[in-house]
Image (cartoon, rainbow, N blue to C red):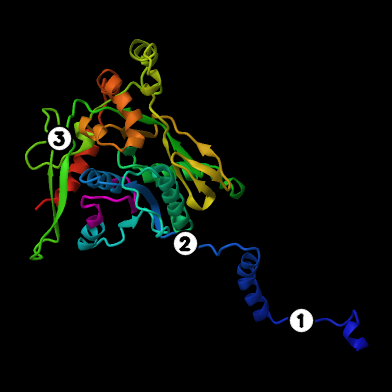
């Protein structure tokens, strides 16, 4: 027994044993402290959104973001009566079964009561965003929580995905600084109706003979400036080209605000509202409507509108505002009635024609 404790006795471990130990030790330690093995993300940029009766607007929105580099859409349906549920089958029939995923807004709450009036809209929205953020963690590099009326765009002539990659890498000077650009906050510009009275109509139709799986029938908003020609798909980015003055985009903003909004009893309705954010999902603990409410690490970047901006088509058409749920209609109706024409539709500033044309061309595959 004493020989076992002699200090001069040496032990030479087998090289193969050491190699195996070094290979498994990181995973053993990670499991022991309750962590997760690092998974390689299978998506670059995922959009999470809650939707209800967004046909045909959602088609333009999907095609726009596809051109911007988004490669996954997770849409939480909140009781649509239109053909929203057909979207997943539509893309699957065209060889893209994983592009769009439709999930019930109460997927993890099967005992929740029916809420047709959407009185629990904010609770549902919070649940959806966090459920999607958790699903995307370690499976998607980046995630965006944007609505169907929000289009994020870079005036630098690059796609959204190219912009994120360039800015994210630019701050990675050394390994210790890798968390510096994990959140991007995008500044919005709110657009009015530009005189549009009626919402667009559209539906996905199943071909029972299997010649074409799906086609779409869509019509414009019934006004002279709806920007819709024969054989064209109705587009909100083309039909609503005018926005409100924006403090970062217009040198005469203060002058215009003072003349239109400052002395009005509802002057707060002239606001552009809060923007939306892009972040790495594994670095966010609690997802919020406009940004990550609690992040694990990293700091915010709020790019200037000359680099990145959000086109927010908040009203779409008079009919759309009138049909909002009670919870949302009161505030938006005040803003619409008082300021749609004089403020939110006062500055002509459409998305670049090249982008609109590219989306229009992409939408042709929806036709018979």
Percent position (x, y) of residue 129?
A: 43, 48
Residue on which disc 3 sits: 221
Percent position (x, y) of residue 90?
A: 21, 58
The stretch drawn in magenta includes residue 70: yes
Residue on which disc 2 sits: 40
Give the side of residue 169 with respect to residue 114, left or right. right
Percent position (x, y) of residue 246?
A: 37, 23
**Numbered disc 2: secondary structure:** loop
Residue 246's place in the image compared with 173, above or below, is: above
Q: Nearer the viewer, residue 172 or 100?
A: 100
Are circles 1 and 3 on residues that touch, CB within 8 Å? no
Looking at the image, tell me whether mark 3 or mark 2 is earlier in sequence order: 2
**Numbered disc 1: secondary structure:** loop
Real-space Cα distance between discs 3 and 2? 45 Å
Numbered disc in front, either 3 or 2: 3
| Residue 339 figure quarter | top left
| Residue 10 figure quarter | bottom right
Q: Nearer the viewer, residue 292 or 77?
A: 77
The span picked out in magenta is: 67-87
The residue at 38%/15% (across/down) is: 265
């Amino acid at each position: 027994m004493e020989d076992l404790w002699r200090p001069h006795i040496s032990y030479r471990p087998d090289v193969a044993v050491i190699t195996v130990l070094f290979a498994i030790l990181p995973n053993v330690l990670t499991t022991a402290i309750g962590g997760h093995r690092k998974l390689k993300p299978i998506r670059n940029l995922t959009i999470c959104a809650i939707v209800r009766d967004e046909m045909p607007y959602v088609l333009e929105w999907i095609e726009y973001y596809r051109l911007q580099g988004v490669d996954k859409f997770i849409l939480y349906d909140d009781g649509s009566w239109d053909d929203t549920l057909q979207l997943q089958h539509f893309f699957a029939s065209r060889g893209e079964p994983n592009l769009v995923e439709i999930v019930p807004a109460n997927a993890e709450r099967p005992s929740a009561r029916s809420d047709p009036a959407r009185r629990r809209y904010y609770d549902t929205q919070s649940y959806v965003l966090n459920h999607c953020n958790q699903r995307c963690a370690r499976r998607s590099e980046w995630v965006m929580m944007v609505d169907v009326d929000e289009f994020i765009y870079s005036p630098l002539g690059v796609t959204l995905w190219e912009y994120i990659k360039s800015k994210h890498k630019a701050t990675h000077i050394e390994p210790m600084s890798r968390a510096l650009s994990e959140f991007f906050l995008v500044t919005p510009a709110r657009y009015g109706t530009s005189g549009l009275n009626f919402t667009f109509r559209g539906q996905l139709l199943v071909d029972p003979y299997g010649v074409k799986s799906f086609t779409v029938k869509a019509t414009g908003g019934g006004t002279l400036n709806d920007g819709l020609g024969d054989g064209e798909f109705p587009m909100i980015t083309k039909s609503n080209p005018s926005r409100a003055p924006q403090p970062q985009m217009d040198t005469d903003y203060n002058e215009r605000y003072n003349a239109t909004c400052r002395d009005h009893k509802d002057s707060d309705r002239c606001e552009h509202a809060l923007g939306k954010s892009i972040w790495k999902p594994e670095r966010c603990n609690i997802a919020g409507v406009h940004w990550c409410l609690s992040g694990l690490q990293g700091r915010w970047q709020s790019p200037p509108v000359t680099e990145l901006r959000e086109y927010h088509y908040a009203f779409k058409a008079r009919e759309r505002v009138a049909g909002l749920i009670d919870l949302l209609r009161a505030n938006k109706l005040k803003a619409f009635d008082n300021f749609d024409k004089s403020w939110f539709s006062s500055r002509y500033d459409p998305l670049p024609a090249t982008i609109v044309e590219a989306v229009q061309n992409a939408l042709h595959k929806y036709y018979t």
